Amino acid sequence: MDEDTDLFRDEIDEFDSEVFSVKTDAKFSISINASKSLEMYDQPIQYETKKRLHYIRFIDKRIDGGWTQKNIDPLLAQLTSYDNEPKPKWRAIAAWYSKYRKSNFCITALIPSHGKKGNRALKNSSGDFYFNKALEDKYLRKERPSVATTYRYYCDLIQVENSRLVSGEITPLSYTGFNARIKSLEPYDVDLARFGRSYVQKKYKLGDKFSEPTSVMERVEIDHTVLDFTVLMEDNQIVIGRPTITALVDCYSSCVVGFYVSFNEPSHLSIRAALVNTMLSKDDVINSFSSINADWPCHGKIELLVVDNGVEFWGDSLESACKELGINTSYNPVGKPWKKPKVERFFGTLNTEFLDSLPGKNFRSIDAKGDYQPDKEAAISFSLFNELLHKWIIEVYNQKADDRKTRVPIAKWYEGASVYPPIEYAGDDQELLCVKLGVLDTRSISKDGIQFLHLRYDSPELLEYRKYTPVASKRGLKADIKINPHDLSYIYVYLEQQECYLKVPAKDPDGYTIGLTLTQHKVNIKNRRRNVTDSQDSVSLAKSRLEIEQMVNQALVNKQKQKGMKKLAKYQGIDSNTAHSTVPVNTSQALPSAKAPKNDNNGIDTFDWNSDDIEAF
C-alpha cells in the first residue's frame, strides 16, 4: 500500500478530544488526568505530527474557500515537499485540518492514530482502502448518491479485487458497519463535499477572516527588555543592578496582560513565569499590594503568541508546551521590531513615562548621562519598585487613552471580553497549566523513587505504580517528568498506563528543597565540592546553601558594593513574584559545621554563580 494511502488510513478514525480531570482512583488519589504530551512520543511520531502541522499552516494561509480538492490541489503544487518526502493527498490534509479545527487547534489532534495505539495492529487495512475510495468516488460528490449506492460500489470494488487474488481475500464491511462509518464522518467535511461552500456557510455560519484581532487574547505579543533603572536591596542601600522585564500585551485592547521581572537573563524560564502570570487570575496579585485601587481583569487562554526570534523562544520544551495548551506561536522576523508594535510601544512608554523621573534611572548615552551616576542616585528597593510597577501598569497604562484618543485599553478589554470572553483556567485547570509549562525530563523509577539532580522524589502512589506496571525494557521502568523551575520541592510524573500526572514530593528531611529554585540548586551543586567529605548529598547541599546565605548576610551587614550583587539577586530568586528583595536565612536549616570561607570580599566574587553547565534539558 502506498504511503499516502497509509497516512490517510487512520485519519477517519474518531478522535477523542483531550479532557482533563482529577483522578479519583484509590491508588492515584492525587493525580491529574491528561492526554499524553507530544514531546513524550518517539521522535518519528513528533516528526510526522509537526509535518502535518506544516502542511496545514501552509494551506490555511493561502486557501480561498473550503478545504476541497479543487482548492487544495493547486496549493499543493506550490508547496515545497517536507524534507524531500512525497506530498500527501488533498483528502489527507483536509482530514488533518478537520481534526485540528475540532480540537480547538491543539497539535495533539495531529498525532498519527497508530502512534497512540501502541502494539495494536490495524485491522482490515485493505478494506479501509476501498472504503476510502468509495467515499471519494461516490459519497462525497455533489451528486449526493445515497449510502446504499455507495455501499454497492464499495462491494463491487472488493469483489473485483478478490477475483484477482490467489489467497487472502478481503472481507467487506456489513451494510450496518459501513453505514456506521459513514455516520461517524465529520459533518462539516461531508456537507462541504456534498452541498458546497454556500450551504455550509449558512449551516455553520462561517465568518470571514480578519487581519486585525476581533477579541481579547486572540493575539498577544511578548518580549524582553533590560530596564533603564537601577534598584537596591531591601533596607540596606546596596545596588543590585538593572532588572529584566518580560511583558505580554494584548493586541485587541492594548492592555498589558501579564509580566515577569527578575535579574535572570532572558530565557525559557522567565517566559514560563510570564505566561503563568498572564493566563491565571490576577486577584492574588491585586490583594498583595494595598496601594492598588483598580482591577486587573486580564487573563485567560492565549490563541496566538507573537514572539521574537531569540534563542530563548526556540526551546523544544517550551514550544511543545504551548502547542499542548493550544497556543499557536508566530515568530517575528529578525530586525523588524515594528511588527510587534504593541509590546514595543509599551516598553517605550515604560521608559519615557514611568522610569523617567525615578531616582536611579539610566541614560542610553554617555553624553545624555553627563555627571549623573545611577548607582549613587538609586534610592528605590526592588520590593517598592515591584509595587510601583504594578500600580503604574494597572492604574495608569491600562487606563490611559492612546495617543489618537480612539480607545482606552481597559475599556476595550471589557468590551471585547463581554462579547467573546477568553477561556479561563480555574480549579484543577490552573494546576494543569503549571504542569504543562513545566520543564520536561525523562527519569528511571527505581526502588528509591526518582532521582533528579541529586534530589530524590518518592511517594506511596509512585510505589504502587512501580509495583503494578510491567517493565518492557532492560533499562527498567522510565517515566517523563515535569519540573517547576521555581519550586523543586515536588515534581509531576506522567503515568503512561493511567494517562495522568502524579505529583510526587521530594524526600527532604532537612528542608533543603523548601523554596528552592532550579537556578539555586544548580549553583549549590557546582559549589558543594567544598563539602566532599560529607557522606550524604542532602547534607552537603544544605551546607553549600547555608554557606551562600551566610556570605549574603555578611555582605548585607558590611553594606559594601559588590560586583556580584546582580548574580546574588539571581541566586536568591528576587523577582516580581516575591514580596521582598531579600531572602532571610532559614535558621532552622542551619548546620553548625558549615562555615563561610574567608577572603577580602566575603566570597561573593570568587563564588561560582554560573549554573548553565549542570545537566541541560
Image (cartoon, grey):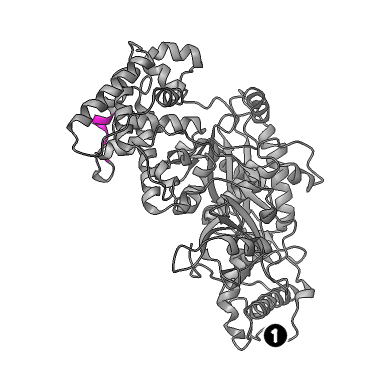
Could you tell me residue 521's position as x and y percent? 61, 69
Q: Residue extending furthest right?
A: 290
Q: Nearer the viewer, residue 99 or 616?
A: 99
Could you tell me residue 290's position as x and y percent? 82, 46
The correct choice, above or below, for 392 with respect to 158 in the image is: below
Segment colored magenta: 76-81
The correct choice, above or below, for 468 with respect to 453 in the image is: above
Q: Of the residues shown, which amino acid type is indicated by label 1?
A: Lys
Q: Is residue 353 visible?
A: no
- Which quarter of the figure is the N terminus placed in? top left
Q: Residue extending furthest front?
A: 167
Q: Is residue 581 magenta?
A: no
Instruction: Check disc 1 and report the residue beneath it.
Output: 595
Which element is circle 1 on?
loop
Could you tell me residue 235's position as x and y percent? 78, 64
Quadrant of the rendered image containing residue 95: top left
Is 577 positioned to the left or the right of 441 in the image?
A: right
The residue located at (37%, 42%) in the rendering is 122
Q: Residues within 10 Å of mark 1 (few under 14, many from 20)?
A: some
Q: Is residue 77 magenta?
A: yes
Q: Nearer the viewer, residue 23 or 612?
A: 23
Q: Nearer the viewer, residue 290 or 468?
A: 468
Is 297 positioned to the left or the right of 265 in the image?
A: right
Is 138 positioned to the left or the right of 208 in the image?
A: left
The residue located at (28%, 37%) in the rendering is 4
The residue located at (44%, 69%) in the rendering is 474
The correct choice, above or below, for 496 with respect to 286 in the image is: below
Q: Nearer the viewer, residue 567 or 531?
A: 531
